[in-house]
Image (spheres, helix red, strand yellow):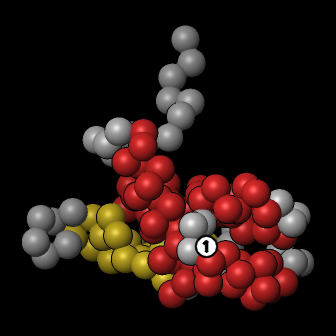
Amino acid sequence: MINNLGARKLSRTGSHRRAMFSNMATSLLLHEHVETTLPKAKELRRVVERVIADAKNNRRIEVRRVIKDKVVYHKVFDVLAPRYKERDGGFTRILKLGARRGDAAEAALVKLV
């Protein structure tokens, strides 16, 4: 039996997860860094890496499925894809920030390299 083939569920429904990661990816691509919990950061990395790779290969429909904001959509193709043109992968970096003050959740900073 093969286990753990999918992504983390994060105690959310599939539609909530897709919407949450779409919003987080939009924020990350717009501001180039975002602070969140460590499990969300690890899943966000998967989403953003795919968006940038699709933008490099000019797959506009796949990028549009994740990025809904027009400003960010154009930034991905006009600024980020040329920036990472020579890079094969690893467009994001996760920095651990320690425990969050309110609920002691492990916080992390996700930023573009």
The residue under the point 43% across, 78% down is: 34
Instruction: State the image coordinates of residue 1 (x, y, percent, origin top left).
Output: 55, 11
Q: Check disc 1 and report the residue beneath it.
A: 92
- The reply to whether residue 89 is in sight is no
Badge 1 density bin: few <14, some 14–19, many ≥20, Cα 10 Å: some
* Quadrant of the image containing the C terminus: bottom right
Q: Residue furthest left?
A: 102
Q: Secondary structure at mark 1?
A: strand
Q: Please determine whether, in this image, residue 9 is positioned above or below residue 44.
A: above
Position of 31 with respect to 46 (left or right) is left
Which residue occupies 70% across, 62% down?
A: 63
Considering every residue shown, the one lying at the far top of the view is: 1
Looking at the rendering, which quadrant does residue 100 occupy? bottom left
- 28 or 40, which lies in front? 28
Figure check: 109 above or below 46 = below
Give left or right: position of 39 versus 62: left
Residue at point 42%, 39% (across, down): 14
Foreground of the two, 70 or 93: 70
Among the 4 quarters of the image, the one containing residue 101: bottom left
Query: Where is residue 93, by image quadrant?
Result: bottom right
Looking at numbered disc 1 in the image, what kind of residue is underneath it? Thr
Pinpoint residue 108: horizontal percent, then vertical percent.
37, 72
Residue 47, x across and y down, in percent: 59, 58
